[in-house]
């Protein structure tokens, strides 16, 4: 499809963005997804909501569909590494999954030092942090630089606030057994290596990501939640990465940073009660970037496949 048609298609979709959903079962509303409990199964609906600053900022046409279909694609591609929760995709933005007992741990895996939030590795490094989950970071790292090794920096997955945690604490607090930690952390590293290879083949860098694992009804450890979506992962364009690093420019990316920036410039997104509506132009740009990363990674036409 040519660029102009894609933009038109996105624009026409703006009034039809999906921000609320309805389905049978007890409903749990997350930041982006609505989950319905059907007993042994869950129906996870990925909406078009875009969240940042701990609130919903706006809606992006086709975002839910991009995330759901991209996640499904990665789940399928990685079955040889570890089994996952997918049962089927009844709709393009809905996934039926096996309900699991999810370990209260987020498996953050990273190969670059970056980020801007208070808890980002780059922010903490700048403030002097050198020891993370048993790894020692060398002096003199530059923002967005590759790390000496791929690191797993887990956080807790708690109701109120996620905090960094070490493997030793995860086991001591009873979040997982040592054997479970061994199995899941090995799987996380293998998934990340596979993701990096696939992305690299198509000219993008898988910078970092987050996995969740759970136990199914038969006590098997499987991959749950989402995998390698632009909401759970950072992707940078490989072609311009090195030059931009040398020139101390931010890498070309596929994340929601441009929306965050616009809101910071036009209001106080942390404190204002109501927020301005983002311009249509910007919404279209962000939607295009979500569709683009889907097409780059899967090497398929997003609109043709529906
Ligand atoms: N197979 C599964 N079994 C049980 N819970 C799951 C499974 N897959 C994902 N989840 C949970 O469902 C929720 C998905 O909704 P999401 O919008 O991502 O919520 P959040 O805002 O908490 O991240 C997450 O809490 C995730 O841990
Ligand atoms: Mg989530």
Image: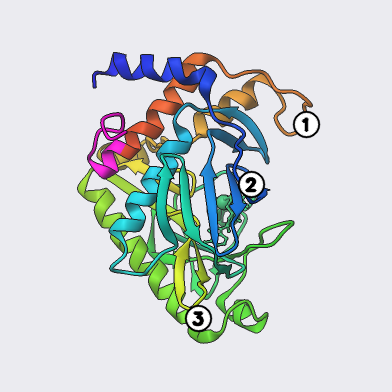
Badge 1 crowding class, 10 Å Cα cut-off, few under 14, some 14 to 19, many 20 or more, is few
Among numbered discs 2 and 3, the one appearing first in the sequence: 2
Foreground pick, 280 / 124: 280
Task: Check contact, mark 2 vs mark 3: CB within 8 A.
Answer: no
Badge 2 crowding class, 10 Å Cα cut-off, few under 14, some 14 to 19, many 20 or more, is few
Q: Which mark is residue 30?
A: 2
Does the closest atom of ligand 1 sit within 8 Å of the Cβ of label 3? Answer: no
Write down the residue under mark 3.
180
Which region is colored magenta?
A: 295-306
Q: Is residue 264 left or right of residue 134?
A: right
Among numbered discs 1 and 3, the one appearing first in the sequence: 3
Mark 2 to mark 1: distance in Å?
A: 21 Å
- Quadrant the N terminus occupies: top left
Q: Secondary structure at mark 2?
A: loop
User: Looking at the magenta stretch, what is its main secondary structure?
Assistant: loop
**Residue 304 belongs to the span the image colors magenta:** yes
Does the closest atom of ligand 1 sit within 8 Å of the Cβ of label 2? Answer: yes
| 28 in relation to 216, above or below | above
Foreground pick, 110 / 64: 64
Q: Position of residue 56 (x, y in %)?
A: 65, 34
Q: Which mark is residue 98?
A: none
Q: Residue at x 53, y 18 (%)?
A: 15
Write down the residue under mark 1.
271
- The nearer-to-camera label among 2 and 3 is 2
Q: Position of residue 275 (x, y in %)?
A: 70, 23
- Quadrant the C terminus occupies: top left
Q: Residue at x 40, y 34 (%)?
A: 290
Q: Secondary structure at mark 1?
A: loop
Residue 228 visible in image = no
Q: Secondary structure at mark 3?
A: helix
């Amino acid at each position: 499809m040519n660029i102009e048609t894609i933009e038109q298609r996105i624009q026409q979709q703006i009034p039809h963005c999906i921000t609320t959903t309805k389905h049978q079962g007890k409903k749990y509303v997350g930041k982006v997804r609505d989950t319905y409990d059907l007993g042994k199964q869950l129906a996870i609906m990925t909406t078009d909501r875009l969240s940042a600053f701990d609130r919903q900022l706006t809606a992006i046409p086709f975002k839910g569909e991009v995330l759901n279909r991209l996640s499904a694609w990665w789940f399928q591609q990685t079955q040889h590494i570890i089994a996952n929760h997918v049962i089927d995709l009844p709709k393009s933005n809905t996934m039926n999954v096996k309900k699991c007992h999810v370990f209260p741990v987020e498996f953050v895996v990273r190969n670059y030092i970056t980020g801007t939030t208070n808890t980002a590795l780059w922010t903490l490094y700048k403030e002097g942090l050198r020891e993370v989950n048993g790894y020692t970071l060398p002096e003199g790292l530059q923002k967005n630089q590759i790390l000496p090794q791929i690191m797993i920096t887990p956080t807790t997955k708690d109701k109120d606030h996620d905090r960094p945690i070490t493997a030793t604490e995860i086991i001591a607090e009873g979040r997982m057994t040592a054997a479970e930690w061994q199995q899941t952390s090995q799987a996380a590293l293998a998934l990340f290596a596979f993701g990096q290879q696939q992305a690299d083949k198509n000219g993008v860098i898988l910078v970092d990501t987050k996995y969740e694992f759970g136990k199914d009804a038969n006590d098997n450890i499987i991959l749950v939640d989402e995998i390698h979506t632009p909401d759970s992962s950072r992707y940078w364009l490989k072609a311009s990465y090195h030059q931009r690093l040398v020139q101390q420019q931010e890498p070309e990316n596929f994340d929601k940073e441009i929306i965050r920036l616009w809101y910071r410039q036009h209001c106080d997104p942390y404190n204002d009660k109501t927020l301005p509506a983002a311009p249509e132009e910007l919404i279209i740009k962000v939607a295009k970037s979500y569709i683009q990363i889907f097409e780059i990674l899967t090497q398929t036409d997003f609109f043709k496949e529906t």
